[in-house]
Image (tube, grey):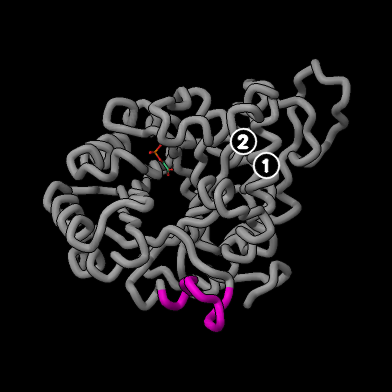
């Protein structure tokens, strides 16, 4: 098992291409500075992002603009099937997804079925552009962990991605940032690209703590991770998951820009620009185009709407049109 202090450099993900891979180093020298805003008595400058006091929209947009000058040319649309489908239904859904997928252009597409359906879905999507992902994994390589699944098992089943730290794992299974961090390192060491989920609950947003919460989740998940790691971050405000409520495009962009600034602080500007930051939370065909139009929204992690091939395909198409 990897401990969080190790640094992970492995890139086992085939066609993953990150802008400036290995070029910038970034690290602490890339710390974003707080812009002048004139209104927050508690701020000193220069200051690391983690100690910012003032998080008004303008500040967030300023930070995003500092580090992102153009829209990501590649996106990812990933379907999180959660605990839905048996083998037959998963096979049928995967067949429909493949059949309804037109030219995906610069959009990577992935489906993340339950563990027991990975093999069947993997068979269906073989030789198609659709990639396979899992929804969770254990931290250990193997051993006496009844009921668990390891990274190497996921790799052998054909997985490219693994969703980690989903809010449902945090809420129902007590997963905290430290555990997510160990899982991220373990996934990377096996060549899996982690899709790391972060997002605040409604009370935290109402209390004005959304940025602080997400910052702790992002930085907590990324201890010891190298700037070359094939990462995906999914911002999923918990109040928008499965509720029909969606963050407005402006709310999504604001948080995504903030996450981008955090990634820039850790990995440097060039590497951070190449990390896909997905939005998740009731994304559907009707709102997908507006969300993926935002400068720092690089795709979506789709729950409910991914269980219907036509909806999922429509979201992929909305993303393709924006790349
Ligand atoms: P939803 O789920 O699209 O059904 O809101 C998203 C997720 O939980 O990943």
> Along the horizontal axis of the image, is 317 left or right of 278?
left
Query: Any mark on residue 17, and which?
Result: none
Q: Nearer the viewer, residue 70 or 255?
A: 255
Viewed as shown, does residue 288 lie left or right of 231?
Answer: left
**Mark 2 Cβ and ligand 1 under 8 Å apart:** no
Q: Most extreme residue toward the front, as rendered?
A: 146
| Residue ID for mark 1 | 215
Q: Is residue 257 above or below residue 178?
A: above
Q: CA distance from mark 2 to mark 1?
A: 8 Å
Residue at 33%, 26% (x, y): give it. 287
Residue at far top of view: 39
Residue 23, horizontal then vertical, whole percent = 58, 61
Left or right: 254 as drawn, with respect to 123? right
Q: Classify the position of the C terminus by image quarter.
A: top left
Of mark 2 and mark 1, the one earlier in the sequence is 1
Q: Is residue 308 left or right of residue 19?
A: left
Residue 275 image point, x, y percent: 50, 51
Q: Is residue 123 visible?
A: yes
Q: Quadrant of residue 60?
A: top right
Residue found at x 70% / y 45%: 216
Q: Does dot 2 land on a helix, a strand or a loop?
A: helix
Residue 74 visible in the picture = no
- Tell me what residue is drawn at x 36 percent, y 34 percent: 283
- Other residues around mark 1 within 10 Å, as few (<14) / some (14–19) / many (≥20): many
Identify the magenta region.
Answer: 140-153
Q: Residues within 10 Å of mark 2 (few under 14, many from 20)?
A: many
Which part of the image, by quadrant, shows the N terminus? bottom right
Query: Picture coordinates of residue 81 (x, y %)?
Result: 33, 50
Question: Label 1 near label 2: C-beta < 8 Å?
Answer: yes
Q: Which residue is most to the bottom?
A: 143
Name the disc covering residue 258, or none: 2
């Amino acid at each position: 098992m990897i401990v969080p202090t190790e640094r992970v450099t492995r890139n086992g993900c085939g066609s993953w291409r990150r802008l400036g891979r290995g070029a910038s180093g970034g690290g602490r020298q890339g710390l974003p500075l707080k812009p002048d805003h004139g209104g927050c008595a508690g701020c000193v400058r220069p200051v690391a992002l983690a100690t910012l006091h003032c998080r008004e929209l303008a500040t967030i947009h300023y930070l995003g603009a500092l580090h992102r000058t153009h829209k990501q040319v590649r996106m990812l649309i990933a379907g999180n099937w959660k605990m839905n489908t048996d083998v037959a239904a998963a096979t049928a859904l995967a067949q429909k997804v493949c059949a309804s997928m037109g030219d995906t252009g610069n959009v990577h597409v992935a489906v993340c079925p339950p563990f027991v359906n990975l093999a069947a879905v993997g068979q269906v999507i073989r030789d198609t552009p659709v990639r396979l992902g899992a929804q969770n994994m254990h931290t250990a390589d193997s051993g006496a962990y009844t009921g668990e699944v390891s990274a190497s098992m996921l790799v052998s089943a054909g997985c490219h991605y693994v969703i980690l730290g989903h809010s449902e794992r945090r809420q129902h299974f007590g997963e905290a940032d430290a555990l997510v961090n160990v899982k991220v390192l373990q996934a990377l060491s096996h060549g899996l690209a982690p899709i790391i989920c972060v997002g605040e609950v409604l009370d935290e947003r109402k209390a004005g703590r959304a940025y602080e919460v997400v910052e702790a989740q992002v930085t907590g998940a990324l201890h010891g991770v190298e700037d070359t790691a094939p990462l995906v971050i999914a911002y999923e405000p918990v109040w928008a998951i499965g509720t029909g409520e969606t963050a407005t495009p402006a709310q999504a962009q604001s948080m995504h820009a903030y996450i981008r600034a955090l990634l820039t602080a850790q990995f440097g500007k060039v590497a951070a620009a190449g990390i896909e930051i997905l939005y998740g939370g009731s994304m559907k065909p009707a709102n997908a185009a507006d969300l993926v139009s935002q400068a720092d929204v690089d795709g979506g992690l789709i729950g409910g709407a991914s269980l219907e091939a036509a909806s999922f395909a429509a979201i992929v198409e909305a993303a393709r049109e924006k790349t």
